[in-house]
Image (spheres, rainbow, N blue to C red):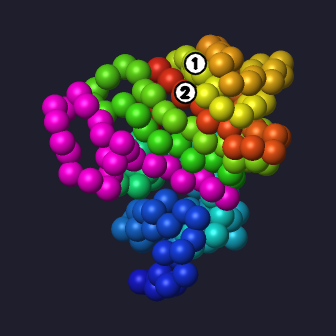
Amino acid sequence: MNEEVPDSVTDSPTPVLGLRLRGMRQRRDWTLQELSARSGLSVGMLSQIERGISSPSIRSLQKLAEIFAVPIGWFFSDAGAAAQGPGWVLRRAQRRVLDLSAKGITKELLAPEGDGSIEMMLITVEPGGSTGEAPYSHAGEDAGTVIEGVLGLEVDGTTSTLQAGDSFRFASTLPHRFWNNGPLRCVVVWAVTPPLY
């Protein structure tokens, strides 16, 4: 059954993510109920994600990417400008963006696409934004530097508050999460290896 996409989705916080999720589900002829059974996410939450009303948690996004056998980068918006320069250069206008604004988080990929072993992101966490109450983990290593604002970071049950100029590094296999409880936005240059997106 072909479902209509409401006009309001283009004004929603996560239109690209929702439209791509809906498209992948429909190409497999899955109902929302079937995707719910496979992912463990409620039908209501999946519907809200598809309509751009709600953003999935990082853990939920990882699960959906696994189910559809795509990299998480599939959910990022496409670059807005044609490539200029050599392949090892990524212009600002070409950055792919994952807009999780319902969670108060935006991730911009800083590294050019390719088969490299490291990935860099510019992560913006708005006041009150967070990855959620449940920590998540993955293979590899995380490292970064807070550029502005204040970041709350929990790694393996230990919590720390980082300010502009503070850095971190930890094994990604340790459960971790982050948030911004401050009054101003927080911006972090974040590196992950191997690439997640």
- Residue 48 visible in the current orientation: yes
- The amino acid type, in three-letter code, at marker 2 is Trp
Give the numbered dot on residue 143. 1
* Residue 64 spot, x, y in % from top left: 53, 51
**Residue 113 image-quadrant placement:** top left
Name the residue rendered at 69%, 52% in the picture: 103
- Residue 136 visible in the current orientation: no
Please state the extent of the stretch shown in magenta in the rendering.
79-102
Badge 1 local density, few (<14 within 10 Å), some, or many (20+)? Answer: some
Q: Quadrant of the N terminus?
A: bottom left
* Residue 46 spot, x, y in % from top left: 62, 65
The mark nearer the N terminus, 2 or 1, is 1
Label 2, on which residue?
A: 190
**Residue 166 image-quadrant placement:** top right
Determine whether the residue tagged by mark 2 lies in a helix, strand or loop.
Answer: strand
The image shows residue 50, relative to residue 121, as above or below, that is: below
In the image: residue 196, left or right of residue 162? left
Please say if the residues under marks 2 and 1 sit with CB atoms less than 8 Å apart. yes
- The amino acid type, in three-letter code, at marker 1 is Ala
Determine whether the residue tagged by mark 1 lies in a helix, strand or loop.
Answer: strand
* Residue 102 spot, x, y in % from top left: 67, 58
Compute the Cα span from label 2 to label 1.
Answer: 6 Å
* Residue 87 spot, x, y in % from top left: 19, 32
Badge 2 local density, few (<14 within 10 Å), some, or many (20+)? Answer: many
